[in-house]
Image: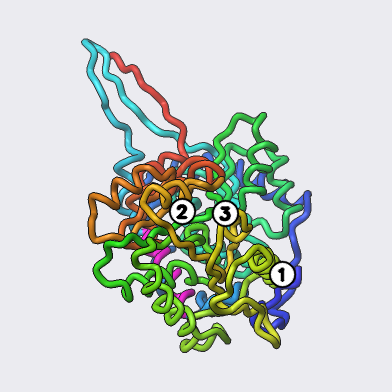
Amino acid sequence: MKLINPATEELIQEINADTIESVLNKYESAKRAQGAWAQRPIRERIECIKRFHDLIEKNQESLAHDLTREVGKPIQEALNELNGARTRIRYFLENAEKWLSPNPVRIDGTTEEVLSFDPLGVIANISAWNYPYLVGVNVFIPALISGNAVLYKPSEFSTITGLNIERLLQEAGVPREVFTAVLGDYQVGECLLDLPLDGYFFTGSYKTGKHIAERVASKLVPVGLELGGKDPLYVTDEVADLKQVANAVAEGCFYNNGQSCCAVERVYVHEKVYDAFIPLFEQEVKSLKVGDPMDRNHQQGSLTRPAQAAFLESQISDALSNGAKLLCGGKRIPGKGAFFEPTVLLNVSHQMKVMKDESFGPIIGVMKVKSDEEAIQLMNDSEYGLTAAVYSKNRERAQDLLSKVNSGTAYINCCDRVSPYLPWAGRKHSGLGATLSFLGILAFTKPRGWHLRA
């Protein structure tokens, strides 16, 4: 595997991918080791994860440097990701034991009824490149604390980060066989699907998630899918500070180059504030500095996958040919690296691909609406249902609007944020199951009901 820096097009290093034989060997080692790991007291497992948390903090500069080199995100965003990952890990450290401990639920005469949770066994964590630490810890941290062994396949675009995670977990005391990185592209992923694993947890596109679910359906094991989105945001005609809203919307659209499942991908603006909003939004977008992600003065780095630039250009071309207006951006930046201008399209409609298909890049369509009813209809007009946001100083109005939008997460006067205290769950093509919160702890267990008599 040749690992290429997307910002410089330079070779970072070459790594040998796994083979069918090596994947099988890693599985067999994990299967042998999982039982002993599960038998260790939960507080010992938690202590290992605590040391992992501390090692991330100790090594954050070098970890952020590696992350930026291989995915192209600005170095400050890489540091932000590591800080966010530690926040999520602390949630699991502080709450996992409470949810995983046996729970007496009832006494029925002479019978005590108790609920307990066992680990699934050996699971696959097929992870993503856009936030490898954040989406990774959603899965492998609660899985390990619950007593599972994990075959962790990082994306081929974040292989070095995957190896760093493996190294630090093992340094923290997690046995090598209990957390093992499996390296390679989709062919290695197919090898994992062929194994008799006890659960599959994937973060990525709807197309791949659907393929995984279909391939392993006959095994009747848990499948967790954290998939994409076409996340809508509605600016009502009741906002306290339109400039502040324009700033927040620009960040929601373009943070991490829009390469996020919960990035804002569609913006609807009430006609009463539309003409005032557009120049403020344009100003915010044009202020974004694109360039070398190691330069802390740049808010936008390179696309992680150079091929995505052609896809973005095709969405822009389709929109323009169907009557859209290009407000700013619209093309690749010449020179080395996969850099793309932050792009805003106006006069868009739902007949255009940019308003229907996930973009996963620095491109946004802004559409004028006449009423809340029209906004709700358009926000629901999607195959996806991950997040939805409404900006309004009238909280009751915003809550009423969002209650009618079919999404797993609802934002009022904010967007593009995740809390470990709340479940991260997609609807429709945005996913299956939930990570984070107590649901994201119990997702890696199987319940057992005890009927106890003396």
- The residue drawn where x is 46% and y is 53% is 138
439 above or below 7? Answer: above
Residue type indicated by callout 2: Asn
Foreground: 133 or 142? 133
Of the two numbered discs 1 and 2 on the same chain, state the one appearing first in sequence.
2
Residue 389 image position (x, y, % from top left): 38, 56
Q: Secondary structure at mark 2?
A: helix
Of the two numbered discs 3 and 1 on the same chain, state the one appearing first in sequence.
1
Which quarter of the rendering shows the N terminus?
bottom right
Asked if the magenta segment contains residue 79, the reply would be: yes
Asked if the magenta segment contains residue 308, the reply would be: no
Q: Badge 2 is on which residue?
A: 138
Residue type indicated by callout 3: His
User: What residue range appears in magenta?
Assistant: 76-89
Residue 280 image position (x, y, % from top left): 39, 78
Residue 33 image position (x, y, % from top left): 57, 45
- The residue drawn where x is 62% and y is 65% is 323
Q: Residue 350 shows which numbered tag?
A: 3
Density class for disc 3 (Cα within 10 Å; few <14, some 14-19, many ≥20) is some
- The residue drawn where x is 23% and y is 54% is 395
Q: Badge 1 is on which residue?
A: 310
